[in-house]
Amino acid sequence: MTPAQAEARIRELREDLERHERLYYVENRIEISDAEFDRRMNELRRLEEEFSQFQDPNSPTRRVGGAPADALPTVAHRVPMLSLENAYSSEELDEWNARAEKLAGGPFGSVAELKIDGLSVSLRYEKGRLVRGATRGDGVRGEDVTANVRTIRTLPLTVAEARPLEIRGEVYLSRGAFERLNQSREEDGLPLFANPRNAASGSLRLLDSKETARRRLSAWIYQVVEPADEARSHRASFAYLRSLGLPVSPHWRFCRTYAEVRAFVEEWRTGREELDFETDGVVVKADSHEIRERLGSTSKAPRWAVAFKYPAEEGLTVVRAIEVQVGRTGVLTPVAHFDPVRLAGTIVRRATLHNYEDLARKDVRVGDTVAVEKGGEVIPKVTRVVVEQRPPGAAPFAMPDRCPACGEKVVREEGAVAVRCVNASCPAQQRESVRHFASRRAMDIEGLGDKLVDRLFREGLITDISSIYGLDASTLAKLERFGEKSASNLMEQIEKSKGAGLARLLLGFGIRHVGERAAHLLAVRFATLDALAGASGEELEAIPEIGPNTGQSVRQWFESAANRRLVERLRASGVDLRSGETVPARGGAFAGKTVVLTGAIPGVTREQATLRLESAGARVSGSVSKKTDFIVAGEEAGSKIARARALGVPVLSWEQAREKMEAE
């Protein structure tokens, strides 16, 4: 294939894939199978790698994100992003409308739309290509999150508009994506996000756009800033946005009278519970831009719009018990069990009190009447105690000084909030560890779910991770309501898991700070568990994205005699302790040299570039210092370039580095 033919095919594939992404993510229509979509995407990816001169940051292949940024720079908004005046009650909404009608000289038509509980962004397209994405920030300047915005599949990377286009919208996380994200974090031993808004906000500000891509953010556009002639009314701007393939929320209505606005607000007060995204209110905007100009703005907010906030849904219930649970990492967590209460469409019977300090501050006691809130929160929480209704004799709750599962003394590390059981043999920790080890994202032992794990522990058939591989079909078949077929299927899954690979095994160990991404990086770099076990802290921290906390956790895990014995039991059971990657050879063009990678390396992943340099003898570091010999810079390189130049460190392009390695 000639370069000209490749360029034409690449252009054709990009347009085709962008169309199918818009159909799937925006219009909820499907014209081709997932397999066919993947085939076309792989063809495009292959052509872009072979003909690297045609690579483009707005290609559909870049939806997975690029290399981690060094920092998020700030950018000035061409037009300030003003906040909205809030109305927290029907009376306040009535007052806003009365003021607006007085200034406008009479009643006017409005557009009422659901207020998405997410993060506001400003997007700019030039010559039809997405060139900038920024957060609201202080309204005048926001953070440049262009790389992360490009991973949002509901947003087109190109539009059929030659004029400069600047639009505003809301980035959010659907309830389904939020639940999957929290499940993943729980399996990795990470703190859970309290609600989708916090998760979306944090995800859009990540320095690693690949991680942002994995979180599956969505967006809806609600305003056209430029070109101004396309926004003479709010309804017209929505039609214009849809014509460009931009996502517009379907949950809006043109209201000719204020009575229709109030009807829309009441309609969604309970109806919003059925949606797959969080909404905390309704935004009301004057439809006509002529009316908007007449109403004007204050220095902080436009007078032609208001955000009505639904009150957080709260229910009163009585605490019947406070139970202390022991998690996989040994942290003791108090959980309040109370009479069932209906909140946000679901029945709630319990709420985590997070930690002892949270419990002590709220002074929750058994027998207390408490207010439980869900509202915008997916995770229920106790917000306050109705002290006036506290029964006589209700005693303050005290955290146990011994683990409720194993009886060992618990500790609270200096400066830490968590109370922790440090007994590695604690049955509660072992049970949670087995659940995590068998989970889909770790060793993926289908059939070994939570209930069966609990049952096997009660029966004494398993005691820790390694004992999974000591199970046999005949013993399992004797379990009540299990049977030979179920036993045979489970044993097949257990046997299959032995070859899951090093990355899944590391994730299954549940090492603190080692999630799916870190497990993959460690497996690729060290290739065998034995090599990783012998790695120094410096070698671990030299891996891009592996920081000091992760490196220290890995070292501490392998320094534990109990963990080393666990590894030997797994080895004896036939569990493959290799990743399938070969250990990079030392020597070559960069032998003994410290090299720093920064920016997006064209044509290869960050891991591939790291392995290639290491195979040429380089020690790849994550930070620039006086000891750095070279810095290899890709596209959109950040502050490391400036620091390298200030220190006199030579800067090479990836092409130059590759030439040096190939010439050796």
Image (tube, helix red, strand yellow):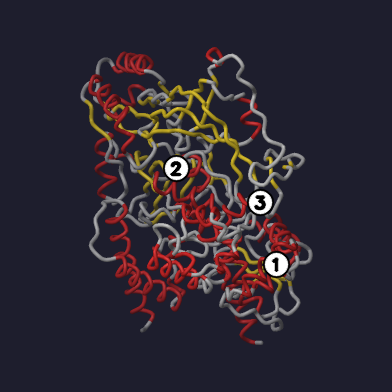
The residue drawn where x is 44% and y is 79% is: 50
In the displayed structure, would residue 297 be above or below residue 528?
above
The residue drawn where x is 60% and y is 49% is: 428
Looking at the image, is mark 3 or mark 2 nearer the viewer? 3
For the residue marked with disc 2, what is the amino acid? Val
Neighbourhood count class around disc 3 (C-alpha, 10 Å): few under 14, some 14–19, many 20 upward? many
Residue 638 percent across, percent down from the top left: 61, 57
**Pointer 1 residue:** 565
Secondary structure category for the residue under label 2: strand
Residue 427 percent across, percent down from the top left: 62, 52
Neighbourhood count class around disc 2 (C-alpha, 10 Å): few under 14, some 14–19, many 20 upward? many
Give how far apart the Cα atoms at labels 3 and 2 are.
47 Å
Residue 463 percent across, percent down from the top left: 60, 59
Mark number, residue 121? 2
For the residue marked with disc 3, what is the amino acid? Cys
Q: Is residue 620 left or right of residue 40?
A: right
**Pointer 3 residue:** 426
Q: Is residue 265 left or right of residue 479?
A: left
Which quadrant would residue 614 be assigned to in this image? Answer: bottom right
Mark number, residue 225? none
For the residue marked with disc 1, what is the amino acid? Arg
Neighbourhood count class around disc 1 (C-alpha, 10 Å): few under 14, some 14–19, many 20 upward? few
